Amino acid sequence: MSKREPTEPREIYLGDWLDHFGIGATEAAKIAGCTQSYISNIKRGARQNINALYLLRLSEHMELNINDFFRPLPSQSQLVALSQLSPKAQAALLGSKRKKA
């Protein structure tokens, strides 16, 4: 058997999402079923092996997909630019795949 190369852990933006939803570390810990220090360690990047069950509980509470935690929130300028488009243009950008050239 060959050894597998260790993979770099993906960056997680859980702290940004919690801040956006106004959820503090203590409340997040209650939702997830873990300790406040566990959540704080995730937020500051000190924890790399994160229990998927905790992320699932948080994502269900916030009505997000777990994968969203691994994507940065859009910037305010991106949101403003999107909001200035017509509803049809917004739907086209957000809901459909790009045409191949």
Image (cartoon, grey):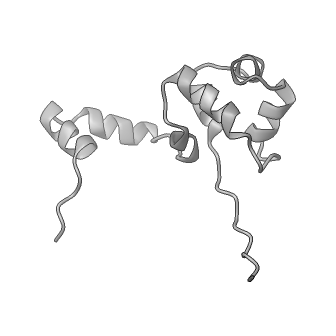
**Relative depth, front residue between 10 and 15:** 10
Q: Position of residue 78 (x, y in %)?
A: 37, 42
Q: At x 22% / y 47%, what residue is drawn?
A: 96
The furthest residue to the front: 1
Q: Position of residue 22 (x, y in %)?
A: 61, 19
**Relative depth, front residue between 84 and 14:** 14
The image shows residue 58, relative to residue 70, as above or below, that is above
Quadrant where the N terminus sits is bottom right
Q: Position of residue 10 (x, y in %)?
A: 64, 56
The furthest residue to the bottom: 2
Q: At x 63% / y 26%, what residue is drawn?
A: 57
Q: At x 62% / y 42%, what residue is drawn?
A: 13
Residue 38 in view of the camera: yes
The image shows residue 11, relative to residue 41, as above or below, that is below
Res. 16 image quadrant = top right
Q: Position of residue 53 (x, y in %)?
A: 68, 34
Q: At x 24% / y 42%, what residue is drawn?
A: 95
Residue 15 in view of the camera: no
Res. 55 image quadrant = top right
Q: How many marks?
A: 0
Res. 87 image quadrant = top left
Quadrant where the C terminus sits is bottom left
